[in-house]
Image: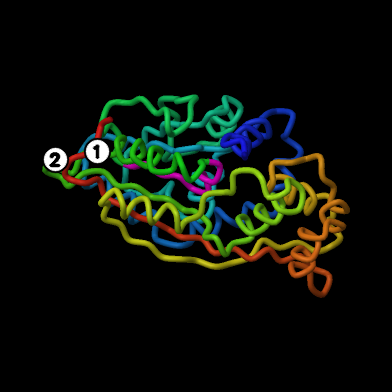
Amino acid sequence: MANLSDTFERSCEHWSEAGRREMEDFYALASVDYRHLAEAIDWKAWLEARQKEVGSRRLRLLDVACGSGKFPAALTSYADVESAAIKSVDYALLDPSGFSISEARHALTMPFTAGAEFEMTLQDLDCHPGIFDIVWATHALYAISHRELETALKRFVHAMRHSRQRDGGGVGFIAHASDKSHYLQFYQHYLNGFKEGLGVPYSSSEQILAALTQMGMTFEAEEISYANGAPESQERQVEGYLQRCLFDSTLSLKDMMANPITGPYLETCRKNGHWQFAQRVTLVFLKAPPEVATE
């Protein structure tokens, strides 16, 4: 029987100082993920609308599984949020890795200022009900098993400001790859090719949408498509990127290419001297329901 925490445990091991070089190689290709999110909507106007909803006080935001702070950094680089007509945002950080919280805190620039820290999983989040105006999770929920996904999403909603209040309540944003994306397809090939099919697959955006529907949440969803790319000459960065996709630094690119399952898949990602890893990412915007469950 598969260890229901194997994927999560390996992901935590890699979010550490020892995994910094691999992390940097990963983001040599994966930073584009966050640029596409930053350019997907008018975030400056979106934040200004949230500020109007709360009046004269600061917005309170929770970044779930904050990683190394690439999303807020992309918003300041590509979405002009630093010029938004808002007060500084009280930016709370949640991650089971203290290393990640430290990295994300140091990545924050105006209008985001570091606030509370929660060194824990989303499933274990213990905060006052409805304390945050904004809760977001960007490429953050993959290592939550399908069995625990609804529990995690209930804690996500628990943290959102209740919509029974006069101003309409808090909002949530989730960006997550679909089961047709490289991230999920490659990980499943890895489990089949190196783990005899055993292990916990990454959660998909389809599963998240199904869980939100089961919970009775109202949400809007749209999909964006793009590719993470690099020339074949950047072999080290590609290897580090793929290792981080799997949270397994024991496998070289040569090992992955030689495997009868991962190898043929990776060949489909290489053409004319370039690597292209196709992504399909679902953007989910949700509002807190009239009564937020607090269990």
Q: How many C-alpha atoms fall within 10 Å of the one at disc 2: few (<14), some, or many (≥20)?
A: few
Q: How far is mark 2 from mark 1, CA to CA?
A: 8 Å
Q: Are marks 2 and 1 in contact (CB under 8 Å)?
A: yes
Say which residue appears at 66% left-offset and 35% top-offset.
Answer: 10
Q: How many marks overall?
A: 2
Q: Secondary structure at mark 2?
A: loop
In the image, 59 versus 232, the foreground residue is 232
Residue 192: image x %, image y %?
71, 53
Vertical order, 56 against 75 (above or below): above
Q: Which mark is residue 54?
A: none
Q: Residue at x 47, y 56 (%)?
A: 205
Q: Quadrant of the N terminus?
A: top right
Side of 135 relative to 218 (left or right): right
What amino acid does circle 1 point to?
A: Arg
* Residue 224, horizontal then vertical, whole percent: 50, 66
| Quadrant position of residue 29 | bottom right
> Does 136 appear in magenta?
yes
Q: Position of residue 97 (x, y in %)?
A: 57, 28
Percent coordinates x, y for residue 238 in the rendering: 78, 54
Q: Residue 222 lies in magenta, yes or no? A: no
The residue stretch that appears in magenta: 134-143
Q: Secondary structure at mark 1?
A: loop
Q: Amino acid at mark 2?
A: Gln
In screen coordinates, is 31 left or right of 269? left
Residue 211 sits above or below residue 14 on the image: below
Residue denoted by label 2: 165
Image quadrant containing the C terminus: top left
Q: Which residue is mark 1?
A: 161
Say which residue appears at 38% left-offset and 50% top-offset. Answer: 173
Q: Is residue 5 rendered to the left or right of residue 159?
A: right
